[in-house]
Image: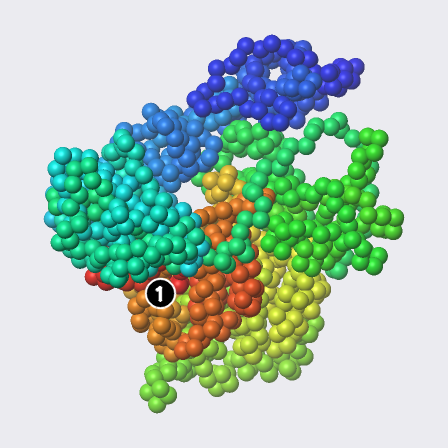
Amino acid sequence: MLRLAARLVSFFWRKADFPEEQAGPLRPELVEGDTTLKTVQGVVTRYCSDYGMIDDLIYFSSEAVTGKVLLNVGQEVIALVEENKVSNGLKAIRVEAVSDKWDDDSKSHGGGLSDPSPRVLIGCVTSLMDHAGYINQTTYFSLESVCEGFEPCKGDWVEAEYWIRPGTWSSEAISVKPLRYKRVDQVCVSSLCGRNGVIDECIFFTLDSLKLPEGYTPRRHDVVSAVVVESSQSCYAWRALCMTPEQRRDFSPATGTAEEAYGALLLKNKGDIEVTKMTNFGTLKEGESRNMVIWIENKGDVPQNLVSCKLGGWDKAKQFRFQMLDKTQLCPKVSPVGVPEKEKDFADEDTNSLDSCRESTAWQTLESSSVNSREVSSGDCACTGENGVKEKHISQKQVTESEPSGLIPPGGETWIVITCDAKNSGRCRELLLLCFSNFIIGRYLEVNVVSEEESLIAVCEPFSWKKSKSSQVLASTKTTVVVTTQKRNSRRQLPSFLPQYPIPDRLKKCVEQKIDILTFQPLLAELLNMSNYKEKFSTLLWLEEIHAEIELKEYNMSGVTLKRNGDLLVLEVPGLAESRPSLYAGDKLILKTQEYNGHVIEYIGYVIEIHEEDVTLKLNPEFEQAYNSEPMDVEFTYNRTTSRRCHFALEQVIHLGVKVLFPEEIILQPPQVTWNWTHAQDTKNDGQSTSKNRKPVKDQTRHAPEKYQAGAQDTPGPRAFATEMSRLADPKAREKEFFNPMLNENQKLAVRRILSGDCRPIPYVLFGPPGTGKTVTIIEAILQVFHALPDSRILVCAPSNSAADLVCLRLHESRVLRPGTMVRVNATCRFEETITEAIRPYCRDGEDVWKASRFRVVITTCSSAGLFYQIGLRVGHFTHVFVDEAGQASEPECLIPLGLVSDVSGQIVLAGDPMQLGPVIKSRLAMAYGLNVSMLERLMSRPAYLRDEDAFGACGAYNPLLVTKLVKNYRSHSALLALPSRLFYHRELEVCADPTVVAALLGWEKLPRKGFPLIFHGVRGSEAREGRSPSWFNPAEAVQALRYCCLLARSVSSRVSTGDIGVITPYRKQVEKIKILLRNVDLMDIKVGSVEEFQGQEYLVIIISTDPCFGALLEYSITNGVYTGCNLPPELQPLQNCGGCVAAPSRPAEPC
């Protein structure tokens, strides 16, 4: 009866008056839709196994009880209560016992949420505000809890002690200190860009938080000492807290103050002269001209002599020019801008963006600038109005410094007509200097220039990301109709042994209600270790799923009609071509009828084909026949297949243990293959090294003889088998040591280490910076393992289809593997037309997953490797697992193939670059707690894999048993390679590219500096969003990218094929807009995409459309004379003035 009563009460929650709880710092009452969350303390008055009551007022279910603790009547609890505004009912969504019994029980489980003892959190500062901040998005801290001398910044890694506040279900840090810190002495300030700079090319600092001696401002090349803390700041891993100068170049304590004071003084009215303040031309179209009159009035008692007018020279396109006029010469149709009677000084204006040049610098500019005026005969000057139309001819005299008309008597006025000839799209700013006898007055001239092409990609509809809330309706009765048989695996008929791994409701409610995630899973705050490995990654995977589901709901559709295609129905999904939403064959959709008499029918359908924005569905046959264009609501669902495979892999890889997941000590194993690696330099053969006396011997101590196993097409007869083995063992049969004779020494070393497998099963890392031949090395290693180890079965994986296809194609082109030895296994949802013709035969063999699993070389994506779990394959099926581009895969994704390798004799090879693109993670919470760190990057940070120049200086600074770093770059010009080499690779990259390729465009007429294949084109455009898309785009940047494409593809002297041009932009909407522009000029063959789509690919020319957030690249471009476009910010103009006096490197791209 009690259970029945509790269920009845749950529908009629009563409202009670509770005293207001005192909220912690920055802890407002949580409100979600029509519910409000409150924290209350009370006593369990009724309780059964499923339901209970608190104070006879608040209903709760057993699922809401933390830790699944069995409560007793009379037990004191803290509850998070949901109050429904409509029904005024109360329901506890979280209940925690605080009695002695619970305390005793929680101690045995490491402490409950109400345990007052603090826990340790290792995390990153993700946000800061006045006197407070957050660690890992959710853990609050006040600056009072920060250790003395440490002023945290966003990105700093910290160690904090925290506790869960019982009244708010949120975590709060009670002490915060840097995770790591050190002192560096006698290091040089290597760069300075605005208020940010870099010390020793590896330590970031910002003047906003840097502690400095009084009167000292850092300058380039100063020698300093600093205290630094570990911090993630762009490409830098350390941040300077404080800095003291050791050696200063021309240091003057008043320099910084004098610069700022002069910048503010420049714009002030002086000598009783008042000058027009409004000097913005507004928006002009390219080719249009507009005039503006600037008034100069002498309100003093002393005549003032206007010696000259000059432009600062910021605008390299020279879009501004001017002419002096007397009052009698003013064109009637030009409306001059009046000066108010009491015009305020510029002293109150914001001068932070002004040119903070010293007075001597300003005078130097004045002396070197030319007067932008021209001599025109009387009556020849055209005065132009707002629309750039000639209106009236007036006389004009050339302005010179000694011109008598420059004298302005007391109470007198004069005018200057400024003409703007719009040439370059984007915003532009120029400095006008009015030079009087004893002072200078400056004014900014501003204009926004738009091009005709921008009209093609203008904002179509106003941005409105938040969906309009539909009126709340009572819950409808619904009937669900499903397809007779599920269509996802119909092509393969695979059994599904994967559990569902449903998202815990408590975790989902934490995210939806914005409750601190540490209240659900406190171990997220711990450093990753073997004991929390599965639980931590499972939680992170669920967080990413929750975010994906929430994001997908934004694309649900209402009142749409379906089209017919034969017997099937087709749904048009706007934005599908841009992956908004992202759908694949086999995905599930829910179609809902309009409500009728409180009843709704749901039809479950599956995607069977996608063409542009048309999605062909398989639904219930009766519905397909009876459907007559009735409006339907469409609900998209998240495909959890990859996530479930990751969860399953987490369970499987536990057998790999510490030795693979957290390697600490190296235990040498007998080599898999022993070779007599003797090199003889053959000078008669163009210096190519050859190998002699090469005798492979299979290591019988580690691998007992076993029956040769292969796929059905790969099983030779006994005689053929013996012949093949004798051919491989005979050095005369293969005179060359390597299949690819062009390998360099580092590549050969990597192949030998992989083949030997001295440290297996500890993962071996092939560290391959861009263009160093990583994939070539992987191909050679696969071929060597295949031929030298006849009992091997190799699984080759990559995070993306393009990367996996590339490995398959390269193996095919090697012509070494016989037909039937290699297979490419694709996901069920992949369409055949997306597969390269050369590898389709290997894909056809992969349709039968059972048969494919017996091939000697299996190639697939990390996710699709989970197909082998579904047919019952487990640990040890594959002897070798290669993961290419491992830096792009999240760790759980990388674990899917690793779960199929032996933990005793199996070998794991991770190839990639931890400094390049990492895993794409969308959940900020999942990122904050480490899901965006690949397994490759995590292993490279462990002591066994760390760089050690003292111990391994002769081996590339890494332990050669575990890591081989490739340093010979075969892709880029030296000017494009030096900057990434310096910033990311310890200056070790060597230029080995084909000169005929990288020098092909060194003479292109549009290069600012001939022989230097880099352009940094600055554009001051305006960013915009449209419709429901949160993605940004910049029309001016898109047009500039288009123009470079046209110049390259249609150049007379240096024409570039459209297939050799690539355009990269990080914003999906910008990709869409640039494609529209290219289609308009018939250049559709130029590839446009995000960084992920270009990973590992090579193009003769790359155009990057992005924000200039990479200060090192911008600084380098300026100092090497390859910057063009809009005027630079004032703080960077000194770099431009010094020309190419600083030898700095560059980045492998031609940014726009």
Element under label 1? loop
User: Few, some or many C-alpha atoms within 10 Å of disc 1 (few <14, some 14-19, many ≥20)?
Assistant: many
Quarter in which the N terminus is drawn: top right
Q: Amino acid at mark 1?
A: Leu
Q: Give 644 or 282, whichever is nearer the viewer.
A: 282
Residue 768 in view, yes or no? no
- Please tell me in which quadrant of the rendered image residue 968 appears: bottom left
Q: What colouring method underlies this structural image? A: rainbow
Provide the residue designation for mark 1. Answer: 1014
- The count of marks equals 1
Does 524 sit left or right of 174 as displayed?
A: right
Place of residue 224 in the rendered image (x, y in percent of width and height, measured from the top left): 18, 46
- Residue appearing at x 65%, y 62% in the figure: 826
Residue projecting furthest to the bottom: 684
Place of residue 236 in the rendered image (x, y in percent of width and height, measured from the top left): 34, 49
- Residue appearing at x 30%, y 40% in the figure: 277
Q: Give 17 or 439, whichever is nearer the viewer.
A: 439
Place of residue 1125 in the rendered image (x, y in percent of width and height, measured from the top left): 35, 58
Relative vertical location of residue 75 with respect to residue 701 in this rendering, above or below: above
Q: Give 403 or 590, whichever is nearer the viewer.
A: 403
- Residue appearing at x 38%, y 38% in the figure: 154
Residue 137 in view, yes or no? yes
Does 504 sit left or right of 327 as displayed?
A: right
- Residue appearing at x 33%, y 44% in the figure: 336
Q: Give 835 or 684, whichever is nearer the viewer.
A: 835
Place of residue 1148 in the rendered image (x, y in percent of width and height, measured from the top left): 38, 63
Quarter in which the C terminus is drawn: bottom left
